[in-house]
Image (cartoon, helix red, strand yellow):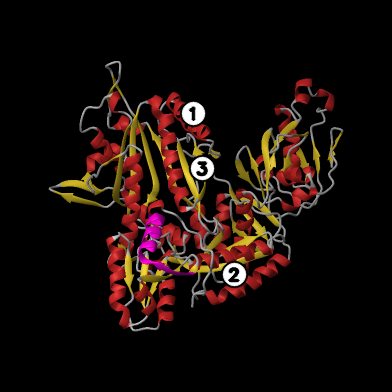
Amino acid sequence: MLWQAGWNREYIRPLQCESIVRGFLFFTSNELKSTLVCDLGDCSSSRPCMGVQKMFGFQCSVKRYHTFFVSDSFLPDTVSEKEKETRIMIITLKDGSKKEYAEAKSVIDIAADISEGLARVACAGEVDGEVVDLRHVVDKDCELSILTFEDEGGKGAFRHTTSHIMAQAIKRLYPDVKLAIGPSIADGFYYDIDSENPITTEDLAKIEVEMKKVVKEALPITRFTKSREEAIAFFKEKNEPYKVELIEDLPEDAEISFYQQGEFVDLCAGPHLMTTKPVKAFKLTSIAGAYWRGSEKNKMLTRIYGTSFTKKADLEEYITRMEEAKKRDHRKLGKELGLFMMSDEGPGFPFFLPKGMVLKNTLLDYWREIHQKAGYVEISTPIMLARHLWETSGHWDHYKENMYTTVIDDQDFAIKPMNCPGGILVYQSEPRSYRDLPLRMGELGLVHRHEKSGQLHGLMRVRCFTQDDAHIFMMPEQIREEIKGVAKLIDEVYQLFGFKYHVELSTRPEDSMGSDEDWEMATDALRGALDDLGLNYVVNEGDGAFYGPKIDFHLEDSIGRTWQCGTIQLDFQLPLRFNCEYVGADGEKHRPIMIHRVAFGSIERFIGILIEHFAGAFPTWLAPVQVKVLPISDKYMDYAEKVVNELKESGIRVEIDTRAEKIGYKIREARLQKIPYMLVVGAKEEEEGKVSVRSRFLGDEGAKDLGEFITSIKAEIKSRENRKVEVQEEQK
């Protein structure tokens, strides 16, 4: 590579002109940048290198060497000492070490410079906190992390590449298919397509075969850009209307980028891998319908889901876990165990059946117990409130599309999507003093939010649910201790159910309200509370609510899935909007600070999580039916009824199986219903006044005095013990 003014630059491999130009511009003074000229010679590229055309109006091939000329008046000795000092670019790596470069470099080149092994497994980069493509050119000092599949950003790039491989395979098999979008998502990816001939689950295997061919071809993946007009014309020619619509909706000054692998070209912002070769372990998992751009007014498209991994073993482990998840599906178990139902007459509005109500009420009893101990008072606020209240809170302007509204006596009302404005009205119902604070008010409030029909999912995504809300009003100096109290309460809840969890602290976003002092004070209080408790946490910079920082609790269930449930949010704005006050020790009026917090989150969703976590086999204290009495035959029905009555008098939830079936069948049925204890009664049991105990935990536990059994199960229920299964009985 020749720089005419006596500067020779040698490259081991051909580089995109963009990289060369950027490197040159990095170490030349501003007044000399305009003197750069490229000897295009026999350049025959049909598309420009990114950035070069924009700067200089020429095109060049990415596979050719070129000579770059600078004005003859420019000589190395004309560069000032200050300019020489600025030629070095310092890259700070994840481990704190630094790399220095005299020219701009792509992320993949920096990765290769660190180690060839790292370059082989690199999926993306992260520059100053922003995930970027491996092709991204670093041209200034920055913090850089090379992301592998072990990083979330790396997983995203890997799976996004897989979605393009799937789209390419689909276009090869079904050329008339129209492509929409294909992003990576948690645990995988999807692509939305529009096909005249429906693609079914039976077609997935054929698509996978074609995907393997694309991977085997090891196609290089290149990135390029086009002008807005060129991009629109390109996709109109290819008859891809969804791509055209996406481009037309982009801002006028948006960079319109494309990725190409072989014959396949897609509109995409990236990031992507360098080739298709690494994507060897993948599986297409399901097909669903999805409205274009999520609007029910638009056409229903076909959404094909899949996942991918770097290793076949990891893929197989994931498939096993998903199969286990299917067995635990709360919708399936909810029906089998008689817990809840859904109806077309109330889409998204769950119906709790008798056993489900027992489960729900047991949870709520526990909630009331721990909140009473923690110094909370319980309130209840109306389900519907006037429009002006929601205007004051900001919901009418920012959340109206998700609210159910009506008109009463010519006045607009809204069914509450959140409990907090009602809680504020309770706070304002009487004058408050510093002596009243902190004031902890809990509410099991039923809220309604409009969810699109395609997003509804059993109890996990519904249109009405009960929030285990609480609002704490306090003085600034009380924040730290109150946060600690809430965190301890949430920890107690999750420990009871056997959930592991991790904590995230989210700080001030760019679009926020309030003073710097308030935000600093609040964030320091949250951080200090977590430090005091010795809780490990991850900081999500800029991910807080617009009204204050927050702490989120992400619990992990028995098969490794995570769920965001508990949250603690500090709020300066609602007390300000509603002009909340208290009289301080100085006799002056002050504004309280407010905490929004939940432990369960949505009771309905939490029940869904519990069903799947326990696979329907709830701990004895929580089980809708704790004991099933099984008479061997009708001859022992009277004794069985006596046993039932004694259990009921002791506060134990019990049922009796009166069917004229064999005892083996009755036992199997009780096991399928996940009953913790079965009491078999026959001649010997009646004669001795005992019961033969079979449990979900040990199988056959032998004969026991009824009184002895009642004492032991009551102790288990009182302690809320989660008894371990030590003997796994076959269920047929």
Taking 613 as reference, is 50 left or right? right
Q: Amino acid at mark 1?
A: Asp
Residue at disc 2, secondary structure:
helix
Are the residues flagged by discs 1 and 2 in contact, CB closer than 8 Å? Answer: no
Question: Residue 612, percent across and down?
Answer: 46, 61
Q: Is residue 722 above or below residue 39?
A: below
Q: Amino acid at mark 2?
A: Ile
The residue under the point 54% across, 39% down is 537
Rendered-image quadrant of the N terminus: top right
Report which quarter residue 103 is drawn in. top right
Residue at disc 1, secondary structure:
helix
Q: Which residues are magenta?
A: 700-717
Badge 1: residue crowd in 10 Å (few <14, some 14–19, many ≥20): some
Q: Is residue 667 above or below residue 100?
A: below
Q: Is residue 60 above or below residue 630?
A: above
Q: Earlier in the sequence, mark 1 or mark 3?
A: 3
Confirm whether the magenta stretch covers residue 686: no
The residue under the point 71% across, 59% down is 278
Residue at disc 3, secondary structure:
strand
Q: Mark on residue 524?
A: 1
Q: Nearer the viewer, residue 305 or 570?
A: 570
Badge 3: residue crowd in 10 Å (few <14, some 14–19, many ≥20): many
Total number of numbered discs in the rendering: 3
Spatial CA span between label 2 and label 3: 41 Å
